Amino acid sequence: MSFIPHFSVHQVFIAPWTTDISSYGWIMLMTFLVGAACGLVGNYLILRRMALMGDAISHSVLPGIVVAFLVTGSRGTVPMFAGAVAAAVLTTVLIEVIHRHSVIKQDAAIGIAFSSLFALGVILIAVFADTVDLDQDCVLNGELPLIAVSPPMTLAGMTLGPPAVVRMGCVLFFSCGLILLFYKELLLSSFDPALASAMGLRSGWIHQLLMIWLSITVVSAFEAVGSILVIAMLILPGATAALISDRLVVRLGWSLVHAALSAVLGLHLSIGLDCSPSGAAVVAGSFLFGVAWVFGPQDGLVSRWWSRKEGRTETLV
Amino acid sequence: MIPLTSSSARQFLGIGGLFVGLNSLTTTLCAARIGDITETVWQAQALRFLTLADPSVRFAVLGTVLLGIVCGLLGGFLVVRRMSLVGDALSHAVLPGVALGFLWNMEKDPVAIFIGATVAGLLGTGLVHLITRTTRLKEDAALGMILAGFFGAGLCLMSMFQRLPTGNKTGIDKFLFGQASAIGAEDIRLMTVVTVLVLGLICVGYKEFLLVSFDPGFSKVCALPTRWLQHGLMLLLTFSVVIALQAVGAVLVSAMLITPAATAYLLTDRMHRMLIYGTLIGMLSGVTGAFLSFLGTHLPTGPFMVLSASGFFVVAFFFAPNRGVIPRWWMARSQRIRIVRENTLKAVYQILENEEFRRESVSLRELAERRRLTFDEVFREVRSLISVNFATAVDDSVALTPSGWQRAASIVRNHRLWELYLTHAVQMAPDHVHDDAEKIEHVLGEDAVRQLERRLEFADRDPHGRPIPAVQAIHGHPNGSREKRVTGYGKSS
């Protein structure tokens, strides 16, 4: 078995859409749902320059999940959610406390808070290894391939699909609803917090709402796909979209496109190289960002080079 | 990792499959070089560690000490420049380089890994720089992207290794969460070289690095190669991340850069002291982490090191002299108490002054009216005065002791001097100066008062026409020795 597996067009490009659609379809759908849900909230994070809060929170939900499991002894969705959201809130509080009550700046505070919590989570897993049934590496990589084989969830006699996919679909639906309902408020408080406060919006509340929204998204995605895909998808779709457009609606649209494309490309890449699907989706997403960086309409390297050249000819003339 | 989740794991599908049977994990995790341990009694393990009995323990201790030194030292530069999260991005970005280093000859070759990781780290930080410069994206987004993108690529490569028949034996999985016991003699040699290099460069170029970190503009003016120094610092930083990688793990290296340095930042203001403290704390947390992870069998080292560093941080956060939460709370509390006492003394003084010091004592009722407080509150204030010997009370009348008189006079004096200063030197209207003086009277030191006296030519009337009391030796009564009055700390009139 060599490092780079033998390449066959049929296996890499055709089979996933035909014979193996029943398993790969779910993986693709899950990756898309994760990318879309994270990308939507990620757009706001990027606008508010809080991109690394997503990173911090997706690391620090780990001890929350482990503690919730140790306390309740069940892998039910509700205790996991409660634990993870509590850990996320704890992270933001810790960052605030360190930042407010000492000379430590916010960046260092973020670094200290999330790394401590993450380390605590890993240690809890290692110490209670016999009871927790959690795997350190799955925390990073997730177990996307197992999604398709997990028993499907049924609701009122209808077979809906793997529970993780259903849950992620709900989160995406919830995110879309939140954006439709509070589009104006979120937009204003992201772009001009001062004006938002002057107009009577509670920016503190909106911030908290965003944090809870973020942690719900992170938690439900993280359980299935691992933290690295979550962190990447919180930033990559939004960042790619930011290079394409100035308008928030358009950006939200493009981030959905980015999520879909990186799900498809990532799957093909992971089959082609026989590597971790989460990692492959991240690589595909980064590649798409690179494309937007080079060919983007405004900030794109090509268009910058072009306009510089134009400028030079004009001055010559 | 895919092999970790094989066989029995497949039946264990909890939520989306994150929960995986551990039986396969345990076998991989103990396959460290220390894997020949059979005893798991923690006392025996502790003894083994403390006596440095066998070479793997010695290597682990030496390795963690070295990485603690390098990370603590260089982290200082990150923390003061608000670049902590650059360390985070850097530590994730080295992962694909580690994997490619493995690919070089399919085994753990420290030098190949070192080179690969350094190249990947530098590429990552270079890309962050390029993205922030050429696009509208801010640094946080660029850092996050590079962090996730590189790490994702690294995970892909690593999962491809795991597939290979030799993949599991290489110990590449140790690079994610760290295993100090996997450090070998060759690693130690490399770490020593890097540590000596970093220490030497920082010692030789301390002044230059300091200037570049705190004031790049000025360092350019001084004709220092600012750009190169910054790149050099970045290179050293990458080195430190790479040598720490094996013991701490890629996910948590950044914490070893940030936390010890931030702890040192809480302890001192001076950069050189901060670097020294950071080095010491880094070393201590390294060894503590290694020790703790030795107590059990399958415990990864990195998280323990990070948690020990966080422990030091928490202690410093609460107890650091001057900057800790508790000393600052205590100082604020004693200051608050002092201010209340001084206000009470002032009120007593003013009541007596209004009656031209014909009496020796004031009643609690008068004091309560003057302070606009309830009887109980005034009672408590007076008790606090009595507890420090500023006053005595008989029934419900309060008299000041000599030291109380002195303090009262000096507070009133500060107040009135400041009012005079504001009206004369700053040209403020006399009816606007009271509130300012009310605050500053408690914080004017002896030096400031002397300067005010000289500046105001030892005036003895405030802008409202009331006398500015003398400070010294007013035994019982400010009116007593009116003629031979001492006007201030220095000069007698």
Image: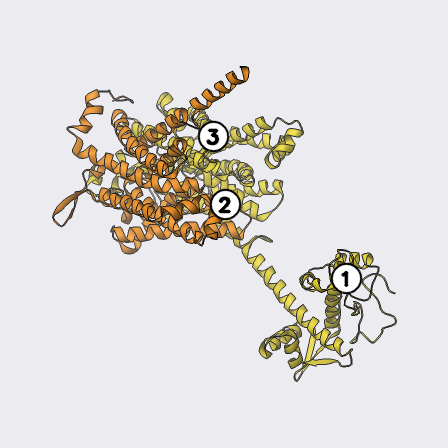
Chain colours: A orange, B yellow
Q: Image quarter for residue B225?
A: top right
Q: Position of residue A152 (x, y in %)?
A: 17, 43
**Label 2: which secondary element:** helix
In this rendering, which labeled residue sits more in front, label 3 or label 1? 1
Specify the farthest residue to the bottom.
B395
Answer left or right for B233 relative to B138: right
Q: Image quarter for residue B113?
A: top left
Residue A257: which disc? Answer: none
The residue that label 2 is drawn on is: A106
Which part of the image, by quadrant, shows the C terminus of chain B? bottom right
Tell whether label 2 touches label 3 (CB within 8 Å): no
Callout 3 amino acid: Thr
The residue that label 1 is drawn on is: B420
Where B156 falls versus B323 (above or below)?
above
Callout 2 amino acid: Gln
Mark pair 2, 1: CA separation = 43 Å
Residue B44 in view, yes or no: no
The residue that label 3 is drawn on is: B125
Q: Residues within 10 Å of mark 3 (few under 14, many from 20)?
A: many
Answer left or right for B298 relative to B133: left
Callout 1 amino acid: Leu
Q: Position of residue A6 (x, y in %)?
A: 24, 20
**Label 1: which secondary element:** helix
Answer left or right for A236 relative to A133: right
Mark pair 3, 2: CA separation = 20 Å
Q: Residues within 10 Å of mark 2 (few under 14, many from 20)?
A: some
In this rendering, which labeled residue sits more in front, label 2 or label 1? 1
Q: Position of residue B20 (x, y in %)?
A: 25, 42
- Marked residue chain, label 3: B
Specify the farthest residue to the left.
A157
